[in-house]
Image (spheres, rainbow, N blue to C red):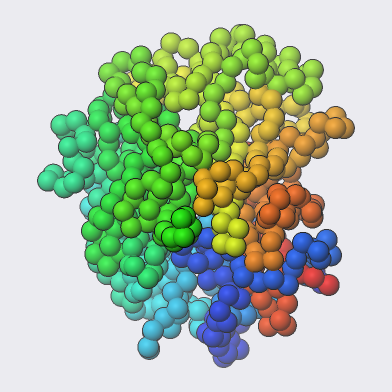
Amino acid sequence: MQSKLRICVMAASLLGGAGLVAAQAGTDWQNYGGDRGAQRYSPLTQITPANVSSLKVAWTYHMKPADATRVATSQTTPLVVGNTMYLGSPYGRIVALDATTGKELWVYKMPGNQRPAPRGMAYWPGEGDYAPELIFGTNDGKMMAIDVKTGKPAERFGEHGVVNLKTPDIMRGYDKNYALTSPPGIYKNLVMTGGSGPEESRSISGDERAWDVRTGKLVWTFHGVPHDGEFGADTWAPGSRKDRAGTNIWNMITVDDKRGIAFLPFTGPGPDRWGGDRHGMNLFGNALVAVDANTGKRLWHFQLLHHEVWDWDQPTPPMLFDVKRNDKTIPAVAAMNKSGYLFILDRLTGKPLYDVKEVPVPKSNVEDEETWPTQPIPVTPPPLAKQSFTAATDVTNITPELESFCKNLIKTKKIHDSVPFSPITSDSQIARFPGSGGGPEWGGGAFDPKLGYFIVNTQELGSIEQLEKKKDGYWASANIPDSFFDQEIPGHGYYPCHNPPWGDLWAVNVNTGKVAWRVNLGVSDIMPEGKRDTGRPNLGAPLATASGLIFIGATDDSRFRAFETKTGKEIWTHKMEASAHASPVSYQGSDGKQYVAVVATGGSFVHSPAVGDSLIVFGLP
C-alpha cells in the first residue's frame, strides 16, 4: 500500500525500543555500504531472478513536509536496524520509520536552516550505558549525534549532541564553507570525518580526523598535505604546502574492522585544474591511504594520479573484498577515481594485484605548469570509461539534429581532440574524457562474493574546457557555457555530443582482472525507435543480493532496474516520478519479507528534473 505519511513528532513514551531492536545477522543495512567495507551486498534471497518481475511498491514515504515551499533533492541512503529505518531528509529532519509499514516512529527537526549531509548518516551500535546513535554532518560544518532511543541529540556528545568541525587548525583564518557531504566512518568507539571545502590554491585544510563517539573529543588527525618532517612532504615544491586547499575526503571512508585499518580516499589538491604553484607529485592528493584506525598512523599509500590537474577526485568508497588466486585468498581493496581506472590492491601492503605501469603522458603548455611525466595505468582491468575523443569518428550521428548541432559546436569553438591524460590548455578548448563528472562517481560499486564480481556504474561524459589566467595570477577554468554532456534539445533534455554509450554498468571478475560483462545503463526516451538503448548519465550506486540480482536507480531516465548478476541481463524495470540519484538498500522486515528501498527526488548536475520527494520501498506481493 502507498500512503502520504506526514511529519508528526511522537512522545518518547511511545518510542518503546525503536532503534534498539537486536539486529538479525544479514537482515539489516547498518552502513552506507551495507558493511563497513562498502560491498553493498545483501545475503537475502527471497527476491530472485525468477520472481523479481512481481516486485511492487510496498509503501512510499514523502519527505516534503506540509509547510515546505520548495522541492529539495536528496542523494541519501537510509539505514535499517532491527525493524527501524533511519532517514536524513533534505528538509532538515531526521526520521525514524517502521521499516515494514513506513509508519513514523519519531522525527527530529534540526535547528534553523541546518540540513543533514546529503548522502546519509552513520550508525554507532552503542556500548554499555551508551545508547546507539546516528552520527552525521551538517551543511554548516558541524557533526551531530542523535540518540536512536529518544530521537533527540545525544547530550554527552560534544556540546548537547553537536561537535563544531570548523576548528582553527582546519579553517586557518579563512572564512570559507566547510561541511561533511557523506557519512562519517565508524571504527569501535571512533567516528572518522573528512570534509569538503573550496577548490582554491590557498584556503582551509582537508585533514582527516577521528573523534571519540562517546564524548566528541578529538583523538587523532591525519594531514592530507604533509607537515614539515612528515612522510610525503618532499613531494611538494618548497613553500607550496602552506595553507594548501583540497586534498580532502568529501566521500566515504571504509574500515577493515578485523585488522583495524581505515582506508582514506583523498581527492586532489587545489586548484583542481592547474598546479603551477605546487610542482611535484603532491602527496596525498588523489591517493588511497591506509592508516591504523586506532591512531591515524600511515601504514601505506597508493597514489592513483600524480600532480592532479584534471579534477578527477577519488569519489568512490574504497571497497574491501577477497581475491582468490592460485588456491590463495588475498585480502584486497578496490580504488577508483573519475578517470575510470580500477586499481585492485593488496589490502595489507597497497601493492597492485594486477600489473600497473607508469605510462608517459602529454605535457602541459600552460604557464608555470609542470605536469608529471607519467601516470599509473592498470594493464588489467581495462579502463571502465571512455578515455579520448576524435571529432572525425566520435561525433554522434544518433539523430541528424544532434549531429549537426555538435559538428557546428566543434567547428565554431575550434574544439580539439584529446588522448588519455590530455592536459587542459590555455590556447584552445579541448574535449577531454572522462570529464569532471566521470567515469565513476560517489556511489561506488557493489560486490558479489559468490561470483567474485565487482559491479560498478560509470558515465561516458566529457568536458569542454580551457584555462585562463585570473586576476589573482592563478590559472583556472574559463567560463565556457557548453560542455559535451550539456547539449540541450529544446523541450526534451540534455544529450552528449559523442556516440553512445553514455552510461554503463560493468562487472569485473576480481579473481582474473577481466571484464565479465558490460551493458548500457539507461534509455533515451526521445530518441527514435531502435536508438533508445544509449545508456544515460547516472549518479548512485548498485546493490547486489545473494539471489543473483543487481538493483540500481542512478540514471536520469527515472527508472529503477534489476539485472541478473551473472549475465548483466536487465530483467525488471519500474518507472518512477523522479530519478533515483541515490543508492538502494535491502533488508528484512518484521513480517519476514525482503524489501528494497531507494530515495527518488531527481536533481543533480546531470540535469535530472527535481520533481520528487519520495522514499520508495519495494516488496513481493
Task: Identify the residue at image location x=70%, y=49%.
Answer: 568
In the rendered image of this protein, does residue 424 appear above or below residue 607? above
Q: In this orientation, which residue lies closer to the viewer: 416 or 191?
A: 416
Residue 244 appears in which quarter of the rendering? top left
Determine whether, in the image, residue 360 is placed left or right of residue 456. left
Q: Position of residue 235 (x, y in %)?
A: 22, 36
Determine whether, in the image, residue 263 is placed left or right of residue 593. left
The answer to whether residue 149 shows anywhere in this view is yes
Task: Identify the residue at image location x=45%, y=22%.
Answer: 422
Task: Identify the residue at image location x=51%, y=40%.
Answer: 381
The answer to whether residue 205 shows anywhere in this view is no
Residue 527 appears in which quarter of the rendering? top right
Q: Position of residue 392 (x, y in %)?
A: 64, 12
Residue 591 appears in which quarter of the rendering? bottom right
Q: Locate the N terminus by quadrant.
A: bottom right
Task: Identify the residue at image location x=43%, y=54%.
Answer: 333
Q: Position of residue 222 (x, y in %)?
A: 26, 54
In the rendered image of this protein, does residue 161 appear above or below residue 343? below
Residue placed farthest to the right in the image? Answer: 529
